[in-house]
Amino acid sequence: MRQIDLNADLGESFGAWRMGDDEGVMPWITSANIACGFHAGDPPTMRKTVALCVRHRVALGAHPSLLDLQGFGRREMKMSPDEIYAQTLYQIGALQAFAHAAGTRLRHVKPHGALYNMAACERALADAIAHAVADFDRRLILVGLAGSALVAAGLALDLAVSREGFCDRRYRADGSLTSRSEPHSVFEDRAEAVAQAVAIATRQQVVSADGATVRVEADTLCVHGDRPDAALFAHDLHQALQEAGIQVTAGPARAC
């Protein structure tokens, strides 16, 4: 039976500001990427989210970002590889402190937003992230866009990698994601997003914005926790994958 991991970006509230429905999403996913304070999240939220993951037996992951609270980490910034390395290492360490206190450990690292997209195509930045992960703990799995420079950087350091596909993001013909600044870059319709996710899980392909068939070899699928219907979407997706004969589990990462 084919397996697929469902990951979600969670713990993105901070202070009095609330983002997402973490408790509603958590029962339907197998991995959580927890904000580490740079694009969202704060220490109490990080601690609470780790505890929620432990309760639901969901794999913990750090979700490092560019330092951009105002822009939710979605604005590109000119950063050197050394700066990216240091910021990534800092954020992994911060979340691991809460994991350790809760009697558990991190399983993976997935960059957020602009950092994720920059590292998908800029090998120097991808190498910086991969080196931070390797230097912190070589047991950690590096999550990156399927076919991207980040996956290649992880493999070059003999890290386990998890190739990611996106349920509700429209793809370009080259396998990259359509920018959020472009219209219709995100599937708002829940059924449409579920259909794309099932196509990735069962056939390893999607239809791009211009109608081309694009191969997407994914080990994990992203459920965006900031969708207004995130909990319903996660439930519908989990059910649809099971009906398609796909086992939803964190499972082992692949050295692809």
Image: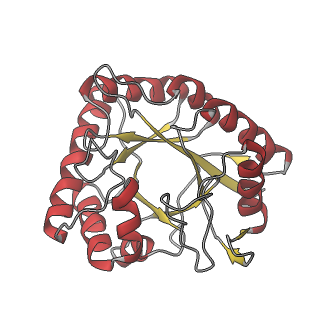
- Vertical comparison of 169 with 8: above or below: below
Query: Percent position (x, y) of residue 237?
Result: 72, 42
Judge by depth and name the residue closer to the eye, 110 or 108.
Answer: 110
Judge by depth and name the residue closer to the eye, 131 or 234.
Answer: 234
- Vertical comparison of 64 with 185: above or below: above
- Vertical comparison of 77 with 101: above or below: below
Q: On the image, which quarter does residue 212 sit in? A: bottom right
Q: Residue at x 41, y 71 (%)?
A: 120
Is residue 236 in sight in this rendering? Answer: yes
Query: Percent position (x, y) of residue 218?
Result: 61, 64
Relative placement, left or right, of 18 versus 30 is left
Q: Residue at x 61, y 50 (%)?
A: 5
Query: Percent position (x, y) of residue 122?
Result: 33, 77
The way the protein has been coloured in the rendering is: secondary structure
- Vertical comparison of 147 with 222: above or below: below
Judge by depth and name the residue closer to the eye, 80 or 250.
Answer: 80
Is residue 159 in sight in this rendering? Answer: no
Q: Quadrant of the N terminus?
A: bottom right
Query: Percent position (x, y) of residue 3?
Result: 69, 54
